Image: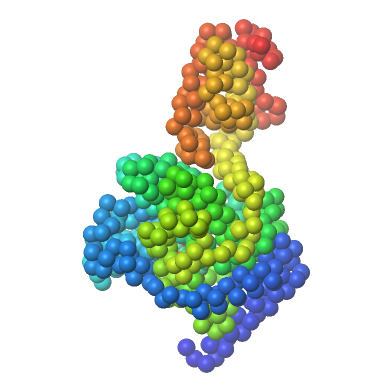
Amino acid sequence: MGCWDALAIEWEGLKYYKSVFARLIMDPATKAKTSFGQMFRGIVVGAHYEWLTNPKKTSESVVEEVCGKGNYDALKGKVVIITGATNGLGLENARCLLKYGCHVVFAMRNKEKAAKVVAEMQAKETLTGKATFINIQLDDLSTVKPFVQEFLAMNLPLHCLINNAGIMAPPVYRASKQGLESQFAINNMSHYLLTHLLLPKLKETAQTSGEARVVYLGSLAGEACWNIDLDTSVPSGPEFYSDIGDYTSTKCIDMIHARHLHDKHTKDKIFVCAVHPGIINSGLGKDNPGLTAAFYAGSSLKHTHKSQAEGAATTMYCALSPEVPKKSVTEGAWWYYNCQPQRCIGFASKATPEFQEKLEAKCWDLAKERHAAKMAKKGQTGNVHGDKKKMMTKIFMHVMPMMDGMKIFRDQDEMERLMTRAAEDMEDDSMLVLQHDRNGTDIAAVQHVQQIHFWCNFILTRQHCTFHEVGDDDDGGHFDCDGEDGDGPD
Ligand SMILES: NC(=O)c1ccc[n+]([C@@H]2O[C@H](COP(=O)([O-])OP(=O)(O)OC[C@H]3O[C@@H](n4cnc5c(N)ncnc54)[C@H](OP(=O)(O)O)[C@@H]3O)[C@@H](O)[C@H]2O)c1
């Protein structure tokens, strides 16, 4: 690169820093998510601390430590799903796992690219593992369920899910297929849904193999987030979008999801971590030339950069190292970089259990709401689910005394939830998500839903109840029993 080109990059970088600085002072959408102080502590201090304590491990050296150098069959029988394994850090992780015999499932959007990168790797070295490609478009929530179905149909265990794919700070607001801000859709929502749909499989594997793991790619940028407002930033609308602000908040959300799952599932021997890989000049900044110039191509942070192999090391450590379960249990460790647990200093460390629950519920509702939007598009009314729920609740309350039904629910809330799901499950193409509850404690719940169906059908046929589905403008369905309109039998 010529001297003028280098200067042009520095100039671009400076302009970007200046624009971030201005937005940190004046732009409500940026100030709501990150601040100058939090950016300085999270990114500038964090990156220098990371640089000074870099153990210089690589993804491959971590695998060698765990498996034994040259023991290329050590990971035979292990199955790992990696999202975004066709480029950057995910690709380096996939290479090392394949080299040591692992079955790597590439959750990817471009099969030709995936086949090409694997062929290129195979041309350079022997990979004893197996690569499987399954399509997922992380900016289209409706592709998550088919991905999971295809994976489950393979009847394999799942030892580790690596939620790696991500995008960074598109300068202009972009929406996903379901109308969600694109960073939130890709970095958070699709991974949220994917993880929850795969939880039963992870649990099953933990029971049969002793443990399972989930690794989220967080970031020091997530440490730079000081606040997440569930109403305005989850997700941000076009009017409240900030490229850097939303990158920090979506990475922070990934970290909160990881922490939440860690706290909830360590007891099930599912060990969940979030990692900061380092600052690595991969394809991540490609959407934002100014940011690329500032963080990657320019000189300001270059001394702190890691190579791709070094950047992929902590993910490999969290996916494979026998130290991780111990540290999860004894230290409650969930946040890692430089292949060791770190103290989280951003909003993810401050998010209370109540906030975490609310965030989970918000993501869950968004997944369902987007499904409802899909139903409406097919010409069905948006409130049919609600109507069916009402009908089923009434009928079920009626039959409960006969079958001692309340005993199958923990409480009223659970009954409400299962009623909703029973109504939703009546739809032919209801999402798999509706068949697995978000705590993953679902087998009994599915049986309960089947019982509800059974009793509702029974009552409907025996007592001549009818259910009237109503149009959009109506305020809901109602059911008549023995021809009487209104509240139904008491
Ligand atoms: N690099 C860094 O400095 C850095 C720092 C902190 C955290 N991280 C995190 O590390 C993770 C990996 O980053 P990276 O540097 O390896 O990035 P990268 O080189 O840009 O790779 C991103 C991967 O995600 C995939 N992807 C992006 N959008 C997708 C979509 N809509 N559907 C399906 N796949 C999609 C890409 O697929 P294609 O190959 O098809 O494009 C690619 O395989 C990200 O979560 C990032 O936030 C990176």
Residue 394: % across, % down: 62, 18
Residue pictured at 49% horizontal, 25% vertical: 448
Considering every residue shown, the one lying at the far front of the view is 330
Q: How many marks?
A: 0
Answer whether residue 144 is visible to the viewer in this image: no
Comparing 89 with 186, the one in front is 89
Comparing 170 with 132, the one in front is 132
Residue pictured at 58% horizontal, 13% vertical: 401
The quadrant holding residue 485 is top right
Comparing 160 with 193, the one in front is 160
In the figure, 201 relative to 83: above or below? above
In the figure, 1 relative to 133: above or below? below
Residue 241: % across, % down: 67, 60
Indicate left or right for 428 with 60 as reference: right
Answer whether residue 239 is visible to the viewer in this image: yes
The quadrant holding residue 471 is top right
Residue 186: % across, % down: 52, 56
In the figure, 52 relative to 239: above or below? below
* Scheme by which the image is coloured: rainbow
Residue pictured at 48% horizontal, 73% vertical: 280
Quarter of the figure with the C terminus = top right
Residue 45: % across, % down: 60, 75
Considering every residue shown, the one lying at the far right of the view is 26
Residue pictured at 61% horizontal, 17% vertical: 397
